[in-house]
Image: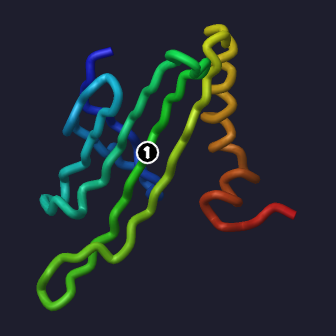
Amino acid sequence: MQAASIAINDGQATPASVVFAPESVTPALSTFADRTTGIALAFRRLRVQNSFAAGKSKVNRAKLFIEYPVVAVVNGVSVVNHTLRATVDLILPDGATDAQRKDLYAFVKNAMSNTLIQGALRDLDPLY
């Protein structure tokens, strides 16, 4: 599938669409950046990585990486104060059917909307 800009809503009270433009695109690893800050070290990035079953490996992998640097100005210079990161790693056996892959994707997508999962992952509220 040909790469194009990716628009994803942020998590603000009134969600805004954030556009991640292609930065580097290859079949194995594609990087998209939100360049709205104008400061390269503050670009939020999405990376999509694919590796396919070959040789002894009988699994395909699809990964999504998200990087969200938070910048502070120190003595007039912008520096990265900290970076929030997320990784989603899908492991898809070569024998998995299209329906099985769709089910796994739906479980991952819908789990992120589940109240208990959100509490644990977003709000640091552990399950007990």
Q: Nearer the viewer, residue 60 or 45?
A: 60
Identify the residue shown where x is 76% and y is 53%.
Answer: 116
Q: Residue at x 45, y 26 (%)?
A: 51
* Residue drawn at (24%, 62%) of the image: 42
Q: Work out whether 59 lies above or below 117.
A: above
The kind of secondary structure element at disc 1 is: strand
Q: Quadrant of the N terminus?
A: top left
Residue 52 seen anywhere in this rendered image of the structure: yes
Question: Does the image show residue 102?
Answer: no
**Image-based side of 91 in relation to 65, left or right:** right
Q: Residue furthest bottom?
A: 75
Q: Position of residue 86 (x, y in %)?
A: 50, 52
Residue 44 is situated, as x and y percent measured from the top left of the image, at: 30, 54
Up-down relation of residue 32 to residue 84 (above or below): above
Can you identify the residue that label 1 sits on? 65
Q: Quadrant of the C terminus?
A: bottom right
